[in-house]
Image (cartoon, grey):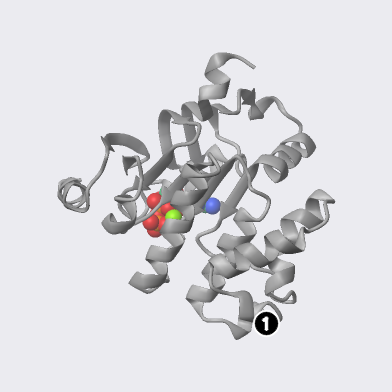
């Protein structure tokens, strides 16, 4: 691996994504440092989810290149891209994407099942406890509140200790205290385990936990703020 590949977890080079005649991403270039926590903010429809989907290999850009740990994922076959994603990426979807017929524990351990590895019961218990769901392991998603479902999705993304975690508004449905617990958990994944985190949020309080905040507008990165504060993020947000 080159020095750049080890310092950069994920990079995008002139990434454009069109949905029919809608240009959701417009020539975005960015390098996410390994072991960094980056928040992504922007108005609804500015391309945040599209940005995350392209950066994580869930979706293919219309043009441009995405590299994960130095590998140009556009050059991989569908099968190898899926495998790379399973082995190295954790994703928390905006719409949770839990499996309704599976209980909480089965949903959390799904990535391990898909990767063909056995769940370490200690690890599963630990992430369930950290997201406050230790006593809900036998419940199905339909029996949980929206915030609880969001936390299952988060536990599922963290259970394999992926190199990079992409989270699309993981605190959107949470009360302030639970949101703080979840953000602390994510911050620790970066500080203690050296994982790379990219988090989309509308909440300046959540963004202030990051090392750096990217502002998206109409499919472009229009600003970056390092060492963000709640006040600083709020005033930048208002001028977007
Ligand atoms: N599958 C799709 N088909 C067509 N258009 C899409 C599709 N996905 C997204 N778009 C469009 O691309 C643009 C960017 O959407 P995206 O979901 O990335 O926005 P967002 O910033 O995540 O918004 P929000 O804050 O509401 O989640 C929007 O105009 C949206 O309508
Ligand atoms: Mg979105």
114 horizontally vs 164: left or right: right
Give coordinates of residue 204: x percent, y percent.
27, 55
Q: Which residue is drawn at 57% across and 21% down?
A: 5
Q: Which residue is drawn at 47% across and 32% down?
A: 16
Q: Name the residue under label 1.
A: 139
In the displayed image of the protein, which residue is found farthest to the top? 2
- The answer to whether mark 1 is within 8 Å of ligand 2 is no
Whether residue 20 is visible, yes or no, is no
Give coordinates of residue 37: x percent, y percent.
42, 42
226 horizontally vs 45: left or right: left
Q: Which residue is drawn at 79% across and 53% down?
A: 114
Image quadrant in which you'd find residue 217: top left
Give coordinates of residue 55: x percent, y percent.
53, 38
Question: Would you place residue 5 above or below residue 229 in this image?
Answer: above
Who is closer to the viewer here, 95 or 26? 95
Give coordinates of residue 38: x percent, y percent.
40, 41
């Amino acid at each position: 691996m080159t020095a750049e590949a080890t310092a950069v977890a994920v990079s995008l080079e002139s990434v454009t994504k069109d949905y029919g005649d809608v240009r959701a991403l417009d020539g975005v270039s960015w390098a996410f440092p390994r072991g960094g926590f980056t928040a992504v903010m922007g108005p609804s429809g500015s391309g945040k989810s599209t940005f995350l989907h392209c950066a994580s290999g869930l979706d293919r850009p219309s043009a441009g290149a995405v590299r994960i740990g130095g590998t140009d994922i556009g050059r991989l076959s569908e099968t190898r891209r899926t495998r790379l994603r399973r082995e190295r990426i954790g994703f928390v979807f905006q719409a949770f994407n839990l499996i309704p017929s599976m209980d909480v524990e089965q949903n959390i351990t799904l990535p391990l099942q898909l990767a063909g590895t056995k769940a370490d019961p200690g690890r599963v218990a630990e992430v369930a406890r950290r997201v406050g769901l230790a006593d809900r392991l036998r419940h199905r998603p339909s029996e949980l509140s929206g915030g609880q479902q969001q936390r299952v999705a988060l536990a599922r993304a963290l259970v394999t200790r992926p190199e990079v975690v992409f989270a699309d508004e993981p605190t959107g449905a949470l009360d302030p205290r639970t949101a703080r617990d979840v953000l602390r958990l994510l911050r620790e994944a970066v500080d203690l385990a050296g994982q790379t985190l990219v988090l989309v949020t509308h909440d300046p309080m959540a963004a202030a936990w990051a090392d750096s905040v990217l502002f998206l507008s109409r499919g472009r990165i229009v600003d970056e703020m390092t060492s963000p504060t709640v006040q600083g993020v709020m005033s930048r947000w208002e001028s977007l």
